[in-house]
């Protein structure tokens, strides 16, 4: 019997959005993960893709299995039902090789790059040595190219966002008072340098208010915003999930991409890392550099994980391209604190 699988089994963006819609043969229940009423693809259509990806790893008994590498490097098989055993079964069927999933591998030398090392040098210099004319460099052409794989498609982007302001008076702010501050009043933020206002939005009301670090009992005005799906937005939340090795038909390009994933992940971490107010002027510099570069490449904004909640944040580089819809008042009823030693 020729088996079929679905997008949920593999969890890869290109497989989900490109390969399966192209070759899907039926709708039904997936043999491997059990997802019901989903598009199914005959596994032989996937063989060439996975063989090409497997070639950037070489056998070495000190390494890990291909399934483990695919999980770690590309965040594949992340569906809770796809444990190691089920993932090995699927990969063995795709490659038509029951032995290869038992062997141990390490990445080839061609899958190692110096992008992350170069970023760390530039980051340190920008913060502590040369702010405007650094000697360290990153490969801007390469980074610009990598960003194209992090740009969201219109159907991956939510139009509804929220912006909050803490109140100092009883009545909520007016809707036209909820936007970004004027240039002469714009202080530095995580993404923007002082004097260059960006519009900071959040995916939920709770996240928008949490980003203000409020105290219990204070009031906040929260405006709902509509952000067009036609904007070019970079998503730095989960590069290992967003960037797909199956976007390439060239083994060398896949290997280089694997080497650069750690750089993209670090850039996303820069925007999420908690920053203390007293050192924000220095610690925000790498984030501001990243966003300025993204803006220079022609994008309208960047999405990143919130450091204070489960939601996500969006920094819009041109505040007037987002439309405010309404504003309401909320009271902070409780502030939760978690500690670690």
Image (cartoon, helix red, strand yellow):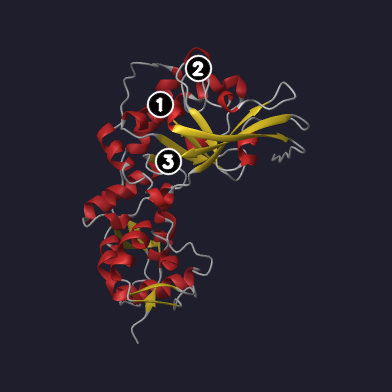
- The reply to whether callout 1 and callout 3 are in contact (CB within 8 Å) is no
Q: Residue at x 35, y 87 (%)?
A: 1
User: Please, what secondary structure does the residue beneath circle 2 have?
Assistant: loop
User: Please, what secondary structure does the residue beneath circle 1 have?
Assistant: helix
Q: Determine the CA span between mark 2 and mark 3.
A: 22 Å
- The reply to whether callout 2 and callout 3 are in contact (CB within 8 Å) is no
Q: Quick one: quadrant of the C terminus?
A: top right
Q: Earlier in the sequence, mark 1 or mark 3?
A: 3
Which residue position holds label 3?
228
Q: Nearer the viewer, mark 1 or mark 3?
A: 3
Q: Is residue 331 left or right of residue 183?
A: right
Return the mark for residue 289: 1
Which residue position holds label 2?
182
Q: Earlier in the sequence, mark 2 or mark 3?
A: 2
Q: Residue at x 31, y 43 (%)?
A: 148
Q: Determine the CA span between mark 2 and mark 1.
A: 21 Å
Q: Determine the CA span between mark 1 and mark 3.
A: 25 Å
Q: Is residue 184 left or right of residue 41?
A: right
Q: Is residue 71 left or right of residue 176?
A: left
Place of residue 130 in the rendered image (x, y in percent of width and height, measured from the top left): 39, 16
Label 2: how many Cα within 10 Å (few below 14, some 14–19, many 20+): few
User: Please, what secondary structure does the residue beneath circle 3 have?
Assistant: loop
Q: Earlier in the sequence, mark 2 or mark 1?
A: 2
Q: Residue at x 25, y 34 (%)?
A: 141
Place of residue 38 in the rendered image (x, y in percent of width and height, measured from the top left): 44, 72
Q: Nearer the viewer, residue 278 or 68?
A: 278
In this rendering, the answer to whether 282 lies above or below 295 is: above
């Amino acid at each position: 019997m020729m088996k079929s699988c679905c997008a949920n089994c593999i969890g890869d963006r290109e497989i989900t959005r490109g390969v399966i819609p192209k070759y899907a043969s039926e709708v039904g229940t997936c043999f491997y993960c059990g997802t019901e009423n989903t598009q199914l693809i005959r596994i032989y259509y996937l063989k060439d893709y996975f063989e090409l990806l497997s070639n950037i790893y070489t056998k070495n008994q000190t390494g890990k299995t291909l399934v483990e590498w695919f999980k770690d490097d590309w965040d594949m098989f992340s569906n809770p039902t796809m444990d190691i055993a089920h993932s090995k079964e699927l990969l063995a069927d795709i490659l038509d090789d029951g032995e290869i999933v038992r062997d141990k591998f390490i990445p080839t030398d061609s899958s190692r790059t110096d992008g992350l090392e170069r970023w760390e040098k530039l980051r340190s210099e920008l913060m502590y040595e040369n702010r405007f004319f650094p000697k360290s460099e990153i490969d801007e052409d390469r980074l610009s190219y990598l960003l194209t794989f992090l740009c969201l498609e219109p159907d991956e982007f939510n139009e509804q966002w929220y912006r909050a302001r803490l109140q100092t008076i009883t009545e909520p702010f007016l809707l036209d008072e909820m936007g970004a501050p004027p240039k002469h009043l714009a202080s530095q933020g995580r993404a923007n340098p002082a004097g260059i206002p960006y519009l900071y939005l959040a995916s939920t009301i709770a996240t928008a208010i949490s980003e203000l670090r409020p105290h219990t009992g204070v009031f906040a005005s929260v405006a709902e915003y509509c952000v067009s799906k036609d904007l070019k937005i970079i998503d730095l939340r989960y590069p290992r999930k967003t960037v797909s090795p199956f976007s390439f038909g060239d083994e060398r390009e896949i290997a280089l991409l694997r080497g650069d994933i750690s750089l993209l992940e670090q850039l996303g971490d820069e925007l999420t890392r908690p920053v203390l107010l007293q050192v924000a002027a220095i610690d925000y510099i790498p984030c501001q550099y990243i966003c300025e570069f993204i803006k220079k490449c022609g994008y309208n904004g960047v999405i990143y994980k919130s450091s204070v909640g489960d939601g996500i944040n969006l920094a819009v580089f041109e505040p007037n391209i987002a439309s405010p819809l309404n504003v309401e008042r909320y009271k902070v009823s409780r502030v939760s604190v978690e500690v670690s030693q």
